[in-house]
Image (tube, helix red, strand yellow):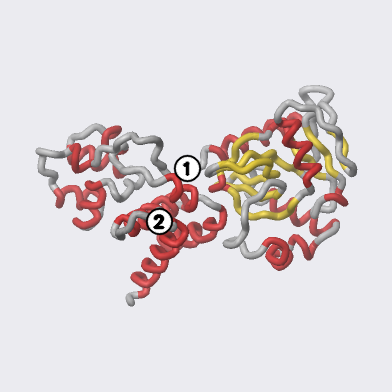
Amino acid sequence: MSEPGVPQRFLELAAAAMAPQQLSNEGLRARFGSPEEVRLAAGQVWRACWEETSLLVLVLELATREVRAAPVTIDPPGEDAASLVVDGRRTVFGVETTVWAGLAGPVPTRVLDRVVDSWEPDLVAWAAETAAGGTPSVPAGARQGVAPVSVFDASEDVRAVLEDDLEALRMAPGLPAAEGSAKVVSLGELLKGRLPDLPALGTALELSQPEVMRILRGSTPLAPGQAEEVAKVTGLPVEAVAAAVRPLPPALAAAAEHPRWRQTWRSRAQRLGVSEGDARLTGGYGAFALAARETGGADPDWEGRLRQFLRGEDLAGSGT
């Protein structure tokens, strides 16, 4: 399951078994709309992935910037006493599918990649109640899993891999979001009374003076490794430099991490030659800076600001 192609192989296996059209790009678009339009909902089965980790998860409940979800497996087969083995006629996959309710927990929305199925409420309710420690009745068209007979059972290996994969997905870097009313001291404030050597900072960071000034004001994030370079030039502790970037509003972080933006950040990362995480980070701060320049007391439309920032970036890149 840690192999990046395995969940795709699940889909190919299912497609060959029963529903090739429904699991094709055209079929998924017909059922759920374009990836940019999909709305998260309980009962959806998503492909979740980050770097080399990829698996299927059943969404049980929505929360801010994450979902409560349980892993789903098709092949290799596996089960335990807290899982539900669903008949192929009740899912789009067309083969027996196991939802591991005992492994349910938080999964960041930023790792959700594509919705591939939507399960009926009785299956979702069973998984949610079992995850909460209950003993619900088994739905029609499914059976409760059986506990492995020994530690050498193949199901134990499947469970261990799932646990590792879930942990890897939860470690995917998220956007820094403001918590409470804690005040962030900008790098410029830390250097108050000590005139920073802007040319030296610019040289060390390979940035223009306006870009350095934005870092000093805390309105632009530091890329990986830049905190160390700033510390060398300024003499400040690395920890103090890293903490000097103003976190994003929670609503902006939630918007930028929604799976509808996943392909946008991937495309931006490829164009800029950076990681997906860095593309989302700098894009989020770009939208934040855009909103900060505008007046008005209403809460910003963060989805709109993200689109506006990216449109402006594309225009700048085209030379217009």
Relative to 286, residue 42 above or below? above
Where, by quadrant of the figure, is residue 159 drawn? top right
The residue wearing badge 1 is: 173
Please give the label number shown on residue 300.
2
Residue 154 visible in the displayed image: no
Describe the element under mark 1 as helix, strand or loop: loop
Question: The residue under label 1 is which amino acid type?
Answer: Pro
Please give the label number shown on residue 13.
none
Q: Which-is-in-front pick, marks 2 and 1? A: 2
Number of marks in the rendered image? 2
Q: Position of residue 13 (x, y in %)?
A: 79, 54
Residue at x 27%, y 34% (from the top left corner): 240
Residue 244 visible in the displayed image: yes
Mark 1 packing: few (<14 Cα in 10 Å), some, or many (20+)? some
Q: Position of residue 62 (x, y in %)?
A: 61, 43
- Disc 2 to disc 1: CB gap under 8 Å: no
Question: The residue under label 2 is which amino acid type?
Answer: Pro
Residue at x 68%, y 31% (from the top left corner): 160
Residue at x 45%, y 48% (from the top left corner): 251
